[in-house]
Image (cartoon, rainbow, N blue to C red):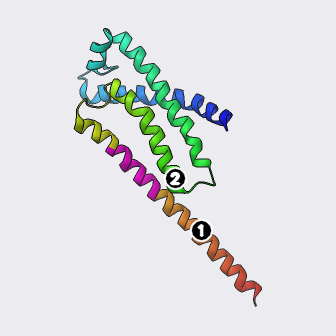
Amino acid sequence: MKKKILLRCLIGAPIGLTISTVITVIISLCTGHGDFYPAPHELIELCGSEIAAVSVQTVCSFLYGAAFGGASVIWELENWSLLRQTLVHLVIVCVSSFPMAFFMYWIPHYFWGALGYIGAFIAIYAIIWLSMYLSIKAKIKKINNGLSAKEKTENR
């Protein structure tokens, strides 16, 4: 299990960096007026230079992706309920990503900004849980219908 978590972290890290980079390009396209904004202005001020801010953001993007990647093994724990998997994954990802997102100024530094970030996580997880629940329920119904049809055929 530890090996699988490590492998997922190693796969997730570059994915986190890629997503972070794509987000900076999208933000720059939407608000940049032709300029590229590689990091939030507040982070640049905090770090003292643009290159320092981008370096810190790069490391945090790797860590962010690694946290998501490593936590993905939770979905494979078949002896856990879907609700338990979802809640544990939510807690791990939120606890590991919130401090980074806050420090990186990816979220506003006021109460409603932080609450919005956590609320978005909870809403996303509610959607994930509901879609997975409905998918599993449909699969179970299909299996049960197949068993019922087989049982009827055998009873003839």
Q: In the image, residue 128 lies at what x, y percent?
A: 45, 52
Residue 123: say if magenta: yes
- Circle 1 packing at 10 Å, graded few (<14), some (14-19), many (20+), is few
Magenta segment range?
A: 119-130
As drawn, 13 above or below 52: below
The image quadrant of residue 81 is bottom right
- Residue at x 70%, y 85% (from the top left corner): 152
Labels in figure, total = 2
- Decide if residue 35 is in sight here: no
- Decide if residue 70 is in sight here: yes
Q: In the image, residue 31 lies at what x, y percent?
A: 24, 27
Q: Amino acid at mark 2?
A: Arg
Residue matched to label 2: 84
Element on which disc 2 rests = helix
Seen in the image, is 3 located left or right of residue 86? Answer: right
Seen in the image, is 145 located left or right of residue 90? Answer: right
Residue matched to label 1: 140
As drawn, 110 above or below 148: above
| Mark toward the viewer: 1 or 2 | 2
Q: Quadrant of the N terminus?
A: top right
> What type of secondary structure mainly makes up the magenta span?
helix
Q: Amino acid at mark 1?
A: Ile
As drawn, 120 above or below 147: above
Mark 1 vs 2, N-terminal side? 2
The image quadrant of residue 25 is top left
Q: In the image, residue 107 lies at what x, y percent?
A: 30, 31
Q: Quadrant of the C terminus?
A: bottom right
The image quadrant of residue 145 is bottom right
Seen in the image, is 4 located left or right of residue 90? Answer: right
- Circle 2 packing at 10 Å, graded few (<14), some (14-19), many (20+), is some
